[in-house]
């Protein structure tokens, strides 16, 4: 089993600024459509920094199946990846949210059809500095109060959230506006995708957010569960109480179990890849996607995410098989 270090890998990806070539060791598809050793060509992928670690792991493992296939994986955020995908510039886009109607319309304008495939679950994780002793949990209403557009320039201190919290400045960290994590969080918490205050430290690189929270006692941030898992020795997770839940479960901490069973609401979400129908003309691309779905359960958990139920992976493979048949007619 590979031992992936997200912070190292992602810092390298950002520092070299565009894309990386991934190929490496181990693992094979039991249900793949052909002999990987006979494959060649290239596959271009870009998009979500959240889905990136899973796709990176799959790409590295894929080399043992197909050493002559070059897989290039970029990290430009879901929004940035969707722009490239809907213009036909890449074969696959990693996405931490569903494609937006405007993006689907743009794809249609460029003659692009696609298949949406779920690959794992994630729980958006709210974190604070380990030296923060006052925040034991937080409600969805309090998160909305902190992040809604009206909070900009007005909600600046912890005691404005709860009176018993200290009269100290709160410093916020979150994904940039191109991020699918940003879109999902704002829709789930504020009630409208893309609606949030702008006076916070934003970055498409989740490791920048990790570092910010880890070095600031007055920080509060959010990002994908894998980045908390990788850095839990220098972060503290905040349980979230969904006040819109009529069952009244109280504050729930994100974990493999609570994300998978949906009790960590409303911040549990599926993760996706989208495949361009034109890529199905390449046997290498078809084999790669099948390999991805065959290995996503194991590799997503290895890098800190929550695998789908086995039956759902089977459904995704059947969906992709029908997509390939239709695209190749």
Image (cartoon, rainbow, N blue to C red):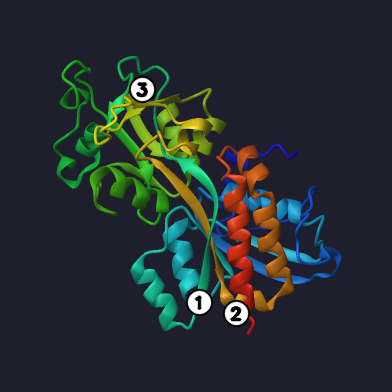
Q: Looking at the image, tell me whether mark 1 or mark 3 is earlier in sequence order.
A: 1
Q: Which residue, given by chain and number where applicable, does mark 3 sit on?
A: 217
> Helix, strand or loop at disc 1?
loop
> Mark 2 and mark 1 in contact (Cβ < 8 Å)?
yes
Q: Note whether residue 95 is visible.
A: yes
* Front of the two marks 2 and 3: 2
The local crowd at label 1, few if under 14, some if 14 to 19, many if 20 or more residues have their Cα within 10 Å, is: some
Which quadrant: the C terminus?
A: bottom right
| Residue sitting at x 49%, y 70% | 84
Q: Is residue 106 left or right of residue 151?
A: right
Q: Which residue, given by chain and number where applicable, does mark 1 sit on?
A: 113
The image quarter containing residue 73 is: bottom right
Q: Which residue, given by chain and number where applicable, does mark 2 sit on?
A: 327
> Helix, strand or loop at disc 2?
helix
- Above or below: residue 217 compared with residue 23: above
The x, y position of residue 226, in whole percent, is: 53, 38
Which quadrant: the N terminus?
A: top right
């Amino acid at each position: 089993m590979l031992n992936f270090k997200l912070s190292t890998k992602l810092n390298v990806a950002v520092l070299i600024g565009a894309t990386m070539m991934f190929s490496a060791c181990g693992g094979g598809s039991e249900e793949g459509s052909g002999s990987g050793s006979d494959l060649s060509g290239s596959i271009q992928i870009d998009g979500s920094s959240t889905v990136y670690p899973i796709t990176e792991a799959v790409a590295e493992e894929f080399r043992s199946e197909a050493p002559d296939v070059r897989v290039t994986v970029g990290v430009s955020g879901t929004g940035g990846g969707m722009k490239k995908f809907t213009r036909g510039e890449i074969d696959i886009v990693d996405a931490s949210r569903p494609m937006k109607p405007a993006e689907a319309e743009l794809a249609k304008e460029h003659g692009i059809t696609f298949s949406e495939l779920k690959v794992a679950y994630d729980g958006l994780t709210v974190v604070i500095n380990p030296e923060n002793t006052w925040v034991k949990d937080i409600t969805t209403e309090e998160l909305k109060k902190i992040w809604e557009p009206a909070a900009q320039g007005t909600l600046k201190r912890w005691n404005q959230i709860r009176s018993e919290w200290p009269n100290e400045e709160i410093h916020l960290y979150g994904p940039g506006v191109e991020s699918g994590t940003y879109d999902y969080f704002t829709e789930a918490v504020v009630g409208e995708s893309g609606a949030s205050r702008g006076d916070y430290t934003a970055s498409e690189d989740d490791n920048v957010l990790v570092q910010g929270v880890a070095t600031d006692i007055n920080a509060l941030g959010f990002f994908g569960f894998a980045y908390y898992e990788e850095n839990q020795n220098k972060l503290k997770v905040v349980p979230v109480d969904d006040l819109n839940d009529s069952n009244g479960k109280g504050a729930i901490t994100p974990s493999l179990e609570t994300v998978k069973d949906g009790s960590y609401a409303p911040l549990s979400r599926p993760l996706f890849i989208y495949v361009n129908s034109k890529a199905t003309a390449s046997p290498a691309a078809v084999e790669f996607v099948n390999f991805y779905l065959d290995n996503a359960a194991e590799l997503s958990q290895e890098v800190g995410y929550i695998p789908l139920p086995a039956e759902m992976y089977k459904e995704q493979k059947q969906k992709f098989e029908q997509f390939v048949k239709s695209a190749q007619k």
